Amino acid sequence: MAHEWDRLMRRLYLELKNQRLYFFVPPFVLFALVPLSVLAGPQGTDPSFSQCVTLSQLFIPSFAAWWPLFVLKEYHSSPARELLVVHRSSRAELLSRMISLWALYVLLAAVVFVYFASLFGRVWYLFAAVAAQSMFMIALGYSLSLLLQNTFIPLIVNFAYSSIFMLAVLDSPLNIFTIGTFSDAGSLVKPATVAAVAIVLLLAGYQAERRLYTRSM
């Protein structure tokens, strides 16, 4: 088990390294775009926290699938797909990467929220919501990528989804985002549902991954 985990981490490191400049897009969004956009709003009042809520939900989940989709892109070329057969000991190669990249992304986002906590003091319910939304976006990209056998359409769907439901503020059961503040545990009812849907999407993607593995053998 330890050997499998070590191999996964080493491969994941190399895959992220191979993304070159594209690797730095999510860190730029997390550590520059989101904080600076929040600071550009009015200071010291509740509207500032409302802007933090809006901008965090808009940008952070939207770029959660960036690394995963670039990793998946490598597996849609014929030579890379053969890796699913080479590593016969694990039939969840891609699912493991999706979960690991989500954990890494949320860990980096936590650093940003430590800074937000120093400004607003009450951000951890929002952080939990953003973590669930980020899981949903990764799960959506993962399942669509394996079903459609490409990453371009999932990438377009990712940003189109965020634009339609966050910027247009559409009130729909399909909208994973929440308008308003996150001040108590009751505000996490919708994010909990979003996390449950994300798990279903991950399982659906895993089934597609297993079929891909079977066809590649």
Image (cartoon, grey):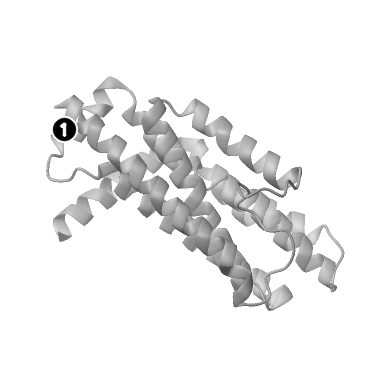
Image point (47%, 42%), residue name? 140
- The amino acid sitting under disc 1 is Val
Q: Secondary structure at mark 1?
A: helix
Q: Is the residue 39 above or below the residue 182 in the image?
A: above
Res. 23 visible in picture: yes
Q: Is the residue 87 above or below the residue 2 in the image?
A: above
Image point (27%, 28%), residue name? 80
**Residue 109: x and y, percent?**
55, 60
Depth check, front residue: 181 or 30: 181
Give the quarter of the image for residue 121.
bottom right
Label 1 neighbour load within 10 Å: few <14, some 14-19, many 20+: some
Depth check, front residue: 158 or 21: 158
List the single residue furthest toward the front: 173
The quarter of the rendered structure image containing the N terminus is bottom left
The quarter of the rendered structure image containing the C terminus is top left
List the single residue furthest toward the top: 78
**Residue 40: x and y, percent?**
82, 57
Give the side of residue 166 with respect to residue 139, left or right: right
Residue carrying label 1: 85
Give the side of residue 176 with respect to residue 46, left or right: left
**Residue 203: x and y, percent?**
34, 47
Res. 19 visible in picture: no
